[in-house]
Image (cartoon, grey):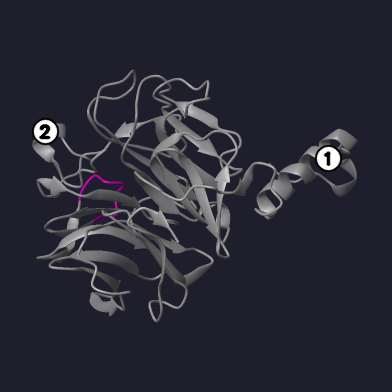
Amino acid sequence: MKKHWIIVLGALLLIIAGCQEENSKPVESNDEVKETQKKEKETASLSESSFYKPTSRKQINHVHGIGYPGNQHELFVATHLGPLIYLDGTWYEAKANNNDYMGFQAASDGFYSSGHPGEESDLPNPIGLIKSTDRGKTLEQLGFQGESDFHYLAVGYETHSIYAVNQQENSEMDIGVYYSEDASEWNKVQLKGIPDQINGIFAHPSDANVVAITSPKGLYLSEDQGESFTPITEGSSITSMVFLKDRIIFVKQGAASQLVSFKNGEETPISMPNKIEKAIDYLAVNPQNENEISFHTSDGSLYQTKDAGESWVTLIDQGKIN
């Protein structure tokens, strides 16, 4: 399936309680304690997880997003055939729920996504909006099951506020971009000041009012939940970006792709692994270590640095797992 990076606005409207006293707390039953311990173990150690195993896959095609869910040091790759996780030199695959996750977004307690069910799934098609807090073992259905496949989502890593680009009418949305604090109530945003062509939408991790849009004309920022935008860079195509605590890392696309650190109006190039001529479609930074940057390119390659660009490793080379 061919990835479309620039979606014409005219065609779509857009792409895009108080604490109890200590002695009054209820005592958990043995079964409750065991279940809690089991869940903690699942999320604490990937190598000991009963839901993941080292993968036998040699090829990865159709990546739909990357990120670091759940404040883990694990790079999650959403693929057409289900999720893969890279950690300490080993690739892991899920034993079940190998769904085609579209619009994948990492969050502090897990991930949000949309897409289509896997071969052995009993989920409706499309799967609407879902959330998982245990690496995809269990899926919370947040709405639009059997109605919508959101290819473009943005979720605040800590706030969990959601922006959904709706490309086809459903029971709650017309065509356009919608915002929700908790997936229970959705409001359409106005998007004043954006250019005609858009590449992507990105939510600030800790400020629910801030959202950005990338475009062939530059990077645009909103501080009112997407009602209005102003350009903060102009003249170059920006294909992807990540909000950090005090700066932004974005991808500038020209004859080659370039990672740029942007702070206080100043741009500082980040050293690249080599000349990356293909577009960088997905970019992620480890929230626990901002020196760890990963990006995926349109030819199916995945690169990672753990020292802010001083050295890079190729995790996937044109679809082939290294």
**What is the three-letter code of the residue carrying label 1?**
Lys
Q: Do tag 2 and tag 1 residues touch (Cβ < 8 Å)?
A: no
2 or 1: tag closer to the N-terminus: 2
Crowd class of label 1 (few under 14; some 14 to 19; many from 20; radius 10 Å): few
Is residue 207 positioned above or below 130 on the image?
Answer: below
Q: Is residue 225 magenta?
A: yes
- Report the residue marked by disc 2: 11
The magenta region covers: 221-228
Disc 1 on helix, strand or loop? helix
Examine the rendering and report whether any part of residue 301 can be seen.
Answer: yes
Residue 74's label in the rendered image is none
Image quadrant containing the N terminus: top left
Res 233 → quadrant: bottom left
Left/right of residue 38 with respect to residue 91 in the rendered view: right
Residue 229, percent across and down? 20, 52
The chief SS type of the magenta part is loop
Disc 2 on helix, strand or loop? helix
Residue located at (27% from left, 72% from top) = 260
**What is the three-letter code of the residue carrying label 2?**
Ala
Res 14 → quadrant: top left
Residue 218 or 53: which is nearer the viewer?
53
Left/right of residue 235 with respect to residue 284 in the rendered view: left
- Report the residue marked by disc 1: 34
Residue located at (66% from left, 49% from top) = 43
Left/right of residue 201 with respect to residue 155 in the rendered view: left
Residue 36, percent across and down? 77, 42
Q: Residue furthest bottom?
A: 310
Q: Is residue 237 magenta?
A: no
